[in-house]
Amino acid sequence: MKNILLILITLLPFLTKAQVTLIPDQNFEHALVNLGIDSDGVVNGQILTSDAQNVTQLKLDYVGHSYGCCGVTDFTGLEAFTNCEEIKTYFNDIGTINLIPLTKLKKLHLSNSMLSAIDLSGNTNLESLFIGNDYYVKFWNPNHMKELDLSSNHKLRHISASYLLTLEQINLRNNTADSVFIYLGNSYDVPYNDICIEVDDHTSATNGTAPYDTWEVYGNHFFSDDCKKALSNELFILNNFKIYPNPAAEYVSVEYDENAGVQLRGVQILDSSGKWVRSVKDNFHQINVSSLSEGVYLFVIQTDKGNKTEKVVVK
């Protein structure tokens, strides 16, 4: 027994040094070799775990172009980079990624990687997130998640979800950053989405008062304290309110089910540039448009559960 213990004690330092992390994706390991991170310099499906733990910045810019390969499809092994504070990679076809063990991560750039969901609950030090798609190649391996739960990332101050055309909601509860910049810019050749941003105090956020007076949000959005409920109401309004006839010459009518449990409060008429023209507070079944000049108008239907905007052509 003493001899066995002596052998184990003697070998322990070597066993520790020999700990390896599996890297099944050859393109991923090839990039690590070229960056000098994989110290054995050979693409053999593994790297020393200590090599991964020594990395604080992992920049795999244009993996397919810079390293003579064709993009990463599997980031298995990335979870060993536990001291990494910045990861930058894009144009991959990974679908899923495990970032939960990377508790020191501050900056993440993960565009165009075929992601339908991402779990950032373990990355509580995250400050900057680029999770959208590049405009020029937005349909090449695009990220396509519907929601981002960033309620655990209370230090987050910069979010870019550009051309993330499927996005419906972002949970930003618990955010304590002294300023927040959010970019939601969508493409000019597809319809804009109204992104629901869930916050602790949607009234203050909507009015731009403290602590949201240092927030900047670019792109169509609205604030809510319950995005799932708000989006459900929005979908209900979208499906149950319509204006006819369209085009119209003299009158239009707002058609809806008066027994559906929603109250129609008013209709705002705007011109095509968004300039206010007129308010309608009653007689919604016969709105006179004969005095309007020919052209396209925006009719904003206001209800107690949200708004809906329709384009109406007046002839």
Image (cartoon, grey):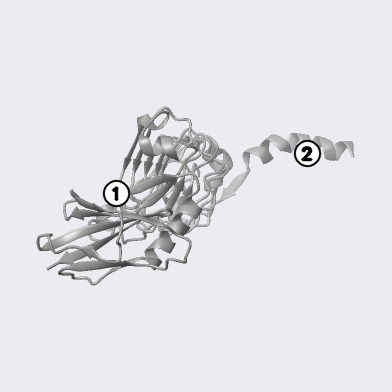
Label 2, on which residue?
A: 8
Left or right of 61? Residue 174 is right
Q: Using the numbered discs, state the Cα–Cα distance from disc 2 to disc 1 in whole angstroms.
A: 59 Å
* Rendered image quadrant of residue 256: bottom left
- Work out whether residue 43 can be spotted: no
The picture places residue 244, in percent across and down from the top left corner, at: 26, 70
Of the 4 image quadrants, the one containing the C terminus is: bottom left
Residue most extreme to the left: 293
Say which amino acid is labelled 1: Gly
Quadrant housing residue 216:
top left
Residue at point 18% right, 70% down?
A: 248
Residues packed near mark 1 inside 10 Å, few (<14), some (14 to 19) or many (20 plus): many
The image position of residue 240, as x and y in percent, is 40, 67
* Residue 164 visible (yes or no): yes
Q: Which mark is residue 48?
A: none
Q: Position of residue 252 (x, y in %)?
A: 24, 67
Where is the N terminus found, in terms of image quarters? top right
Q: Residue at x 23, y 72 (%)?
A: 245
- The mark that comes first in sequence, 2 or 1, is 2
Nearer to us in this view, 57 or 96? 96
Q: Nearer the viewer, mark 2 or mark 1?
A: 1
Secondary structure, mark 2, is: helix
313 sits to left or right of 69: left
Q: Is residue 52 or residue 212 the one in the foreground?
A: 212
Q: Which residue is mark 1?
A: 185
Q: Are marks 2 and 1 in contact (CB under 8 Å)?
A: no
Please state which amino acid type lies under the numbered disc 2.
Leu
Q: Give the residue drawn at x 35%, y 48%.
A: 221
Image position of 261 (left or right of 14): left
Q: What residue is at 41 percent from the left and 42 percent from the top?
A: 129
Q: Residues within 10 Å of mark 2 (few under 14, many from 20)?
A: few
